[in-house]
Structure formats: C-alpha cells, structure tokens
Image (cartoon, rainbow, N blue to C red):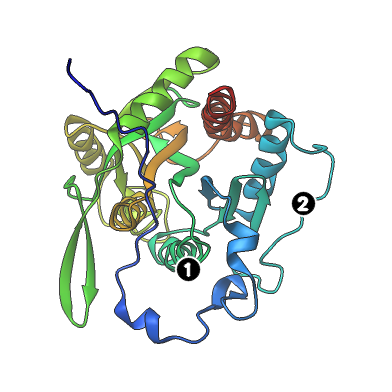
Amino acid sequence: HTLILVNTTTTSQPILVHNPHLDGLKDDVLYHFSLGTETHDLPAMFGDVKFVCVGGSPWRMKSFIEYIASVLGMEDPKAEYPNICAGTDRYAMYKIGPVLSVSHGMGIPSISIMLHELIKLLHHARCTDVTIFRIGTSGGIGLEPGTVVVTKQSVDANFLPKFEQVILGKTVMRNTDLDPGLAQELLECSKELNQFDTQLGNTMCTMDFYEGQARLDGAFCSYTEEDKQEYLHNAQKAGVCNIEMESSVFAAMCKMSGLRAAVVCVTFLDRLKGDQLTSSHDILNNYQQRPQILVGHYIKKHLTHKKDS
C-alpha cells in the first residue's frame, strides 16, 4: 500500500516592507493618514482587511464604500461612513468589513506617498492575502468612451514597462508587471456582468495631463495635430489602450510589497478624436461607476466563494 500525505495547510502571504530602519521606530507615524502605531491599534482596526480599493477622489472612494456595503449586504447603504483619516485633509479612508477604500489624489507623487503609508499600515496591522485595485478614469486610444480597461502592463511615455525613480541622485528602475491571473479573473467577471465592454491592454502612465499626454489644449503646446496623431498611433501599436497618471508606481510598489494588484480604469473619451471632455455629467457619472461595479462583483464573488467553502 502507498501512503499519500496531502498538505492541506495554505500559506498566507504577508505584506512585505523592505526597510530595516522601521524596526527601530518606537512609533511609526503615518502622517498623511493621521494614524500611528502608538496612537492607534492598527491590528484591531485593519487586521481583517482582504481587499483594498484606491482611487483619485475622496468623493469617489466614499461612493465606492457605500456601493460595496450595498452589494455585500453588510450595512445600511444609506448609513454614514466615517472618514478614518478625518484628522488630515490629504487623503480619505473608509472601511466596511474586509474592504478598505482610500483616495490617492492625482499623479505619481500623490499616490506614491499614500502607498508608502498604506503598505506600512497593512504590515503593522498584520494583514495577509490582500488584493488591491486602483479604480479610475482615463483617456482611451481607439476605444469607445465608456470602455473599461484592465491593465496588462503599465508602460511609460516611451511605451516601456518600467517605473523610474531618482533615489540619492541615482536612477532606479522598477518592474511594472501586474498580476496576470487577477486580470483574467476580472475579465471573466465582466463577462458574467455583461453590462459594458471590458478590454485587457497596456496602460500608459504619464507625468502630466496635458503635454505629457499629447494634448493640444494646455497652456503650452509646441507640436502639431499631426505630431499628436503619430505619437498616439505609435502608442496604439505598442499595445497601449488607455492613458492615466498613477499605474506605473502603483504596479511597482504593489509588486515589491507582495500585494496582488490590478488597475481598472474606464475611458472617458477616444484621444484619437479629441482632447476635451464633451459628454454630459450624467454620462460621465455612469462611466465612472463601471470600474466599481466590476471590482464590486469580483469582491462579492470571492467572499461568497469563501463563505461557501
């Protein structure tokens, strides 16, 4: 007879910080969250977090927590959800059950500061197996407005899959790969919803909204419509489906910390056809809800599956 031993234990994925100096801190002050390890019981407050959703505006992230509470049937959707970061006006943070919702402002510097403190918060709270999503808006390239793009790879303005940062005067390059399995699961969720078109493609992350994205309507512009079209068509050939301003550092920092990560952005317009947003407020508001509907479906599906198993 052959004895087969089956290992039924599953390993938990902790949140990784790569900083030996943190061990020497008596109190790690998460300044821009108005939280700290001495002033707050972070494991009690956040230890059960399994899903984090981040997005630009505080209003959108409050809207997301109200939406997810309704989807999960966890609380009265009309209830008031307190801003955990009420002691600061930099970022807003909301929580319901295992879901955390945090605003990150606009651009790489703003989301980078938030992510440093968020990753440390999850680490201090001893969270494990956390999945994080960036939900947002973007400009599409050759896509119908309202299309949702799940990012395959974040690329820079030269269409290269890297994030560059200058540290101590030296340029450091970091990988911008996102979790391919998570991206495929989100595409599957979109098929189940069957409410809007969802595409998998590369996302170009720029340092600026105007010249950095080849717009013709900024305060300064030194190129022609033909130059713009050539650049955007080259981006399209490189697999770029949309343009935004946060995905590269988001992908890089999540990869370094061991977080499963995805970027889910709706396109507000086709940049090959124009630069300005001309759709009505109601239409744009409808578009803006699509990433949260997709991510909400994913979270509900996984929590239901976990409950059933």
Q: Which residue is mark 2?
A: 81
Q: Residue at x 43, y 46 (%)?
A: 129
Tell me if 109 is positioned left or right of 212 in this view: right
Camera-side residue: 285 or 69? 69
Q: Residue furthest front?
A: 1
Residue 75's x, y, as percent? 79, 38
Distance Cα–Cα, label 1 vs label 2: 21 Å
Q: Are marks 1 and 2 in contact (CB under 8 Å)?
A: no
Q: Which residue is mark 1?
A: 117
Q: Identify whether 238 is placed above or below 92.
A: above
Residue 171's x, y, as percent? 16, 71
Q: Residue at x 77, y 51 (%)?
A: 81
Residue 18's x, y, as percent? 29, 69
Q: Amino acid at mark 2?
A: Tyr
Q: Identify whether 28 is placed above or below 279.
A: below
Q: How would you rate the neighbour count of disc 2 (Cα within 10 Å): few for under 14, some for 14-19, many for 20 or more? A: some
Q: Secondary structure at mark 2?
A: loop
